[in-house]
Image: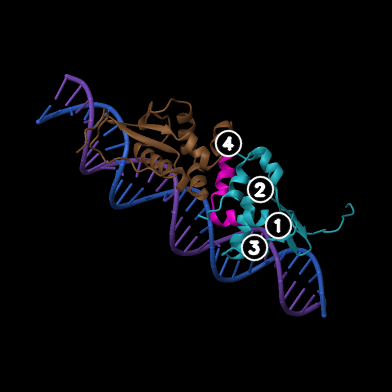
Chain colours: A cyan, B brown, C purple, D blue
Amino acid sequence: MPNQAAGASHRAAPVHTDPEDVSVLTALSALADPVRIQLIRELAGSADWTRSCGSFDVPVGKAALSHHFSVLRGAGLVEQRDEGAKRVNRLRREEFEARFPGLLDLLLRADDTD
Amino acid sequence: MPNQAAGASHRAAPVHTDPEDVSVLTALSALADPVRIQLIRELAGSADWTRSCGSFDVPVGKAALSHHFSVLRGAGLVEQRDEGAKRVNRLRREEFEARFPGLLDLLLRADDTD
DNA sequence: CGGAGTGTAAGATGATCGTCGAACACTGAG
DNA sequence: CTCAGTGTTCGACGATCATCTTACACTCCG
């Protein structure tokens, strides 16, 4: 097997979906949840690859949290990478913006919660 | 009681919500449904006040249809008016666009269904 | 190695949501 | 008035979804 750079992992790599392959319905369904909205907002306020899954201030257990990240990946909103024991995240701003122009901005600009 | 112009009705007027009072979550939730997406698209392709509720080609009964229109009203997406025995509809394009710029266009431009 | 930390997988539970059928109210036409 | 057409409301049902608990796998560190 090929030599791997820093950040190697023997865990199963997270499954990602290209935003181009995401339907409008899937995108809207992924965004229509308070916890996921909060995750995206927090993620948007942090630099890429600096936030591990457990570092978010959301009122759910880690099992539910894992599920939410899975949904966000499936909607092409989040990219994940294993870094040691942690799984760090990145918001796919440009790619998602190219597929759904203005949608992310709508979420991030809004000042209401519910 | 005041003299009423043409189109008077003794039925309870439909309850509308101003798009300005709609939260992002409510808007996204309203749009995250295949039937409602179809309703909005069909409505967008017709002139204002020309489509009665029963004139839409959706695969649900009239009870469910009535529910969907109620959700769309609550999200500030649709305005309704009684005209004789029928209730005719209008897509609130400009008002909704002012509150959520680009969101409606996203739905109407997309060429995928699910 | 052994233990703490991190995240996923599987099963169960409770709530929400979309749907339908039936009953009801209203309108317009005969 | 009677009747057909239109739409809403109510109760019920089933499916989906968010959540939790438990168990498991992996990584790092001592």
Chain letter behind tag 2: A
Report the amino acid beneath label 4.
Leu
Q: Earlier in the sequence, mark 3 or mark 2?
A: 3
Quadrant location of residue B56?
top left
In magenta stretch: residue A14 = no
Report the mark closest to the observer, 1 or 2. Answer: 1
Check the image and report above or below for B23 versus A10: above
C-alpha distance separating marks 1 and 2: 15 Å
Report the amino acid beneath label 1.
Ser
Q: Main secondary structure of the magenta part?
A: helix
Report the mark closest to the observer, 1 or 4. Answer: 1
C-alpha distance separating marks 4 and 2: 16 Å
Read off the residue under disc 3.
A56
A57 relative to B56 in the view: left or right:
right
Asked if the residue at tag 2 contacts the one at tag 1, i.e. Cβ–Cβ closer than 8 Å, the answer is no
Q: Which mark is residue A77?
A: 2
Judged from the image, the secondary structure of the residue bearing numbered disc 4 is: helix
Residue at left offset 39%, top offset 36%: B79
In magenta stretch: residue A36 = yes
Asked if the residue at tag 4 contacts the one at tag 1, i.e. Cβ–Cβ closer than 8 Å, the answer is no
